[in-house]
Image: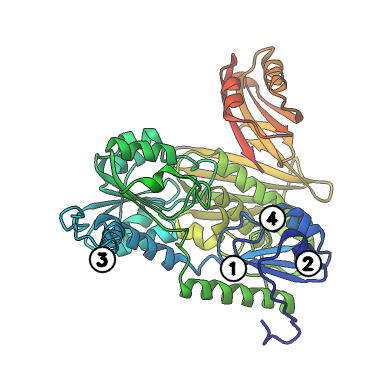
Amino acid sequence: MRKAEGIEVDVKTQLPAQELRNAVKDCYGLIIRSATKVTADIIEAAPKLMVIGRAGIGLDNVDIRSATKRGIVVMNAPEGNVITTAEHTISMMLALSRNIPQATASMKKGLWEKKRFQGREVFNKTLGIVGLGRIGKVVADRAKGLKMNVIGYDPYISPEVIQKLGIELVSLDELYKRADFITIHTPKTKETVGMIDGKAFRKMKTGVKIIHCARGGIVDEKALYEAIVEGKVSGAALDVFEKEPPRDNPLLKLDNVICTPHLGASTAEAQENVAVNIAEQVVDYLLHGIIRNAVNVPSVSAEVMSQLSPYLVLAERLGSFHAQMAKGGIQKVSIEYIGDVAEMDFTPITISLLKGLLTPILKDVVNFVNAPFIARERGIRITESKSREASDFTNLITIHVKTNKEENTISGTIFGKKEPRIVRINSFRLEAAPEGHMLLIQNIDRPGVIGNIGVTLGKRGINIARMQVGQEMERGRNIILLTTDTPVSKTVLNEILSLPYVVSALPLEL
């Protein structure tokens, strides 16, 4: 960065929050790793800040919403640690199967316990990979080199893509049933938190070994402990934990658990790669206005951004709505631009839509640059059409998403100059602002249903900020789209589902 003309660099690490506030007051760019928390308070203290760069993938430590409101570009470096994390997974699997850490500790005590640490070969064993994104695919490739049988589960990727890689795509239950080793490579989302739980372990083959180098919290640690003690799981290799560093974690006391302190991305090569990548990206943006690997802004000029900005917001939220609503793996996305928006260069709008569609699935890995590539990589077909003739609205964006289980259509428009609205969900017409904590309810059209829902939420202290109702007269059904001040918990959701005439209830975050 110091070699870039016009850039003045300050290196200040391990700053407490107040010192960081003072340090960023006159900064135009801020580059961080995982330890630094860029909160709304920090962002507020930096009136000149234009870009935040994260050397790595995860952005849990950055308040992206606050940065976006301020117009600050948030970038990450998603490519630098794929190989490193995959290699760490393979290393952990081999160390676990051959008891290498335990044998090392024994020998350092002066012992020679050859029979005690008899291991297992990985040759011809079945490796089950949960999550076949970039890291999962590299793990599969390396495991095939070890002559393992590789099976995988990923509901968001097409079977055709996986077949080309020589991986057998199976259901999650089938993977549990067949795998000798199971490794997890999914992002941490509300759907994946705690997904490897007691029920999952009971479905697994007795003697299975677990490798977890993804994100803490995906594996239920209490359930894993019980499964190991009971003998269902014969060993586990853990690089990540629900709480880091783990304090008084009973898993660490088990002899057949090996662990590392979140080292998946910790190689000299990976740390250098992500550092160089993010430094180049920040320099390119500050000096030339070039945006790469941004998670909150597409790569367009300032002039085009001004014109398209409301549609980019609308498209991203429609995509996110679709992803959270969809069941099954997405196969095809059809986008129709109607009215004035059809006259614009709508390529950035499509990219924004894809970013919204993929983010609930893949989280921080997706940005405005790689969203089209990831969609193609996952076998998602994209079609665009346009029509200058508008009927009910001056501008309308209609998105039809087909999965391997269902099809859904959502339409949205811009009210005034910049207010995004959802105006259609499948056959239901309504007008709703796509933002905040939302609840999509389908119900039979009967008196008192809406009142019962309101009472249920009220008893739980959840305030309804907005409510929109769409009606389907022919079939006597409604959809109710609520915006609440706070998220709806699983307990409250179950209470709503138990109400008379309520067919379904789905929480959404936009």
Relative to 20, residue 311 above or below: above
* Above or below: residue 422 compared with residue 337: above
> Which of pointers 2 and 4 lies earlier in the amino acid sequence?
2
Q: Residue at x 74, y 57 (%)?
A: 68
Q: Which amino acid type is shown beneath numbered disc 2?
A: Leu
Q: Residue furthest front?
A: 110
Front position among marks 3 and 1: 1
User: What residue did someone put label 4 on?
Assistant: 64
The quarter in which the C terminus is drawn is top right
Name the quadrant containing residue 55.
bottom right
Report if residue 260 is visible in the image: yes
Identify the mark at residue 145; answer none if there is no mark: 3
Tell me if 134 is positioned left or right of 412 in this view: left
**Numbered circle sitting on residue 80:** none
Give how far apart the Cα atoms at labels 3 and 1 are: 31 Å
Label 3 with label 2: CB-CB less than 8 Å: no
The Cα atoms of the two marked residues, 2 and 4, are separated by 13 Å
x, y percent for residue 289:
72, 74
Q: Residues within 10 Å of mark 2 (few under 14, many from 20)?
A: many
Q: Which residue is mark 2?
A: 49
**For marks 4 and 1 on the same chain, the one whose residue lies earlier in the sequence:** 1
Badge 2 or badge 1: first in the primary sequence: 2
Amino acid type, residue under disc 1 in the picture? Ala
Residue of label 1 = 55
Name the residue nearer the viewer: 480 or 127. Answer: 127
Q: Are marks 2 and 1 in contact (CB under 8 Å)?
A: no
Depth order, front residue of 331/253: 253
Instruction: Depth check: give the residue in front, 208 or 99.
Output: 99
Other-residue count near label 4 (Cα within 10 Å), few / some / many at <14 / 14–19 / ≥20: many
What whole-number distance in Å separates the C-alpha atoms at marks 2 and 1?
Answer: 17 Å
Disc 4 residue type (three-letter): Ile
